[in-house]
Amino acid sequence: MMETKISGLTLRNPLMLASGILGVSYSTMLRVAKHGAAAIVTKSISRRPCKGYDNPVVVVTEDAVINAVGLSNPGVKAFKTEIEKFREHDKETPLIVSIYGSRTSDIEAVMNNLPLDMVNGIELNLSCPHA
């Protein structure tokens, strides 16, 4: 496939996992990488665990599928373990961690708890109304 460069990262092809539910556990991230994704963008991670919204979080209409999960995630301290496990099995696939917070101090706390030596990039989730 076509090699692609994005912000200094060389990807073997232009396909990457977008931030979402498949980017929350090391096992699903490994599966996606094994099936051809050139990079993984994790689910957005916050300072503390976030439950998200109660079901239903997906509504199917005749014309659309709409979801509002509410940024559920295990929090940075628990997610750090998922990053470490992913890197035990895959040292090559670029890993971009999506982070969010409602204050600058929240974003700083997430950054201070990430194993940055195992991460290739950071995505700031600034536009989601749930943050």
Image: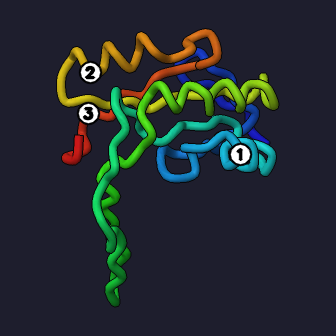
Q: For the residues marked 1 and 2, what is the alpha-carbon distance in whole angstroms?
A: 27 Å
Where's the N terminus, which quadrant?
A: top right
Q: Which residue is mark 3?
A: 126
From the viewer's perspective, is 41 left or right of 73? right
Q: Quadrant of residue 65?
A: bottom left
Q: Which residue is mark 1?
A: 27
Q: Residue at x 67, y 49 (%)?
A: 28
Kindly report which numbered mark, 1 or 3, lies closer to the viewer in this rendering: 1
Residue 46 pos. (x, y %): 35, 32
Amino acid type of the residue that numbered disc 3 sits on in the rendered structure: Leu
Q: Which residue is mark 2?
A: 106
Residue 112 pos. (x, y %): 42, 10
The residue at the far bottom in this view is 62
SS at circle 1: helix
- Disc 3 packing (10 Å; few <14; some 14–19; many ≥20): few
Tag of residue 38: none
Query: Is 66 located above or below residue 5 in the figure?
Result: below
